[in-house]
Image (cartoon, rainbow, N blue to C red):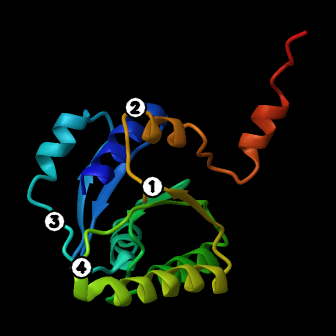
Amino acid sequence: VETGVMVAATLARLVKGRVLLVVFDVVPRAIEATGQTYEALREQAKYVTADGGTSIGCGLLYAIEHGFEADGIVLVSDGAENNSPVFARVYASAAAKDDRWVPVYWYELHGQLRPEWVDRTERERAAFIDGCARAGIDLQRFDLTGGVDAYSIPNLAQTMRASRYSLLDDIMATPLKR
């Protein structure tokens, strides 16, 4: 949850449009992040806990049903999805309907696991990755399983773009020093 708040606060500073933080377990809750500071977002999310009952798809479905049009989707999760609706199905259905496949950035975390959940979590994470691949979702993974520091989130967020190859275009347009 803390990392999700850090990512949302960073994006709220960096992007020109609206940023919506949708926290989810099996019931989503939206927090308007546009213009919010890290401290303000942290206060609004202080009662949110990560405790294993996860439906990533319910967060996306909530945003869709409330008319939020995204240029990109950011997931902050261990990827262990164990409740319906699953993300890949919700995303593929919405993308096919609108013929709009926005980039998906996954800030992959190491879940705080109870020992009895380790095998199940790995299977669920693998199912999430496989489901995205089968649905044709271009999932950009940022591996944060080793931890997060003050520089990792802003540096990763600056590489995110609303179209797949625009970072490459930006790099190629940068003049070389002589």
- Give the residue type that dot 3 points to: Thr
Residue at which label 4 appears: 52
State the mark number for residue 13: 2
Can you tell which quarter of the image residue 174 is in?
Answer: top right
State the mark number for residue 49: 3
Which residue is pictured at 71% across the width and 54% down the height?
164
Calculate the distance from the C-alpha at mark 3 to the C-alpha at mark 1: 19 Å
Comes first in the chain, label 3 or label 1: 3
Can you tell which quarter of the image residue 93 is in?
Answer: bottom right
Comes first in the chain, label 1 or label 4: 4
Calculate the distance from the C-alpha at mark 1 to the C-alpha at mark 4: 18 Å
Comes first in the chain, label 4 or label 2: 2
How packed is label 1: few (under 14 Cα within 10 Å), some, or many (20 or more)?
some
Q: Residue furthest top?
A: 178
Mark whose residue sits in front, 3 or 2: 3
Residue 57, given in percent of the width and then of the height, sits at 40, 78
How packed is label 3: few (under 14 Cα within 10 Å), some, or many (20 or more)?
few
How packed is label 4: few (under 14 Cα within 10 Å), some, or many (20 or more)?
some
